[in-house]
Image (tube, helix red, strand yellow):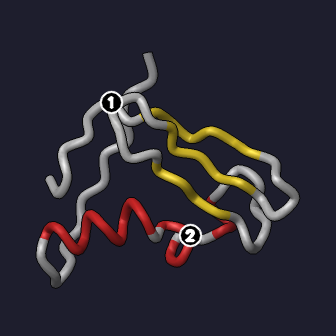
Amino acid sequence: MIEPLRLSFVVRCDAAHAFEVFTTKASTWWPYRHSSSQVPGLMVTFEPRLGGRIFERSPDGAEAEWGEIVLWEPPT
């Protein structure tokens, strides 16, 4: 099994807002050079449910899966 990716940092807003931005607006802040396709204009998607995919979609429609959501408890 691959170990889960764990990140930790401090943001100056409430947890609900931080969760919302992280999971629904990732395309606005994720650096495209740190993606599978490394092309500008990609969309990063979190499917908001247990078992949902985390993936990128490049402008030409190609998808690359990053992972699976194993726990979904907004906003924690």
Residue drawn at point x = 16 percent, y = 84 percent: 12
Furthest-top residue in view? Answer: 1
Residue type at mark 1?
A: Val
How would you rate the neighbour count of disc 1 (Cα within 10 Å): few for under 14, some for 14-19, many for 20 or more?
A: few
Circle 2 sits in a helix, a strand or a loop, which is it? helix
Residue 10 x/y as whole percent: 18, 73
Residue drawn at point x = 26 percent, y = 41 percent: 72
Residue type at mark 2?
A: Ser
Q: Which residue is mark 2?
A: 27
- Please give the label number shown on residue 54: none
Q: CA distance from mark 2 to mark 1?
A: 21 Å
Residue drawn at point x = 26 percent, y = 63 percent: 19
Circle 1 sits in a helix, a strand or a loop, which is it? loop
Q: Which residue is mark 1?
A: 70
Residue 22 x/y as whole percent: 36, 65
- Near-viewer residue (38 or 57): 57
- Near-viewer residue (19 or 37): 19
Residue drawn at point x = 81 percent, y = 48 percent: 62
User: Is 10 situated left or right of 31 in this image?
Assistant: left
Q: How many marks?
A: 2
Residue 34 x/y as whole percent: 62, 61
Residue 57 x/y as whole percent: 71, 54
Query: 47 above or below 21?
Result: above
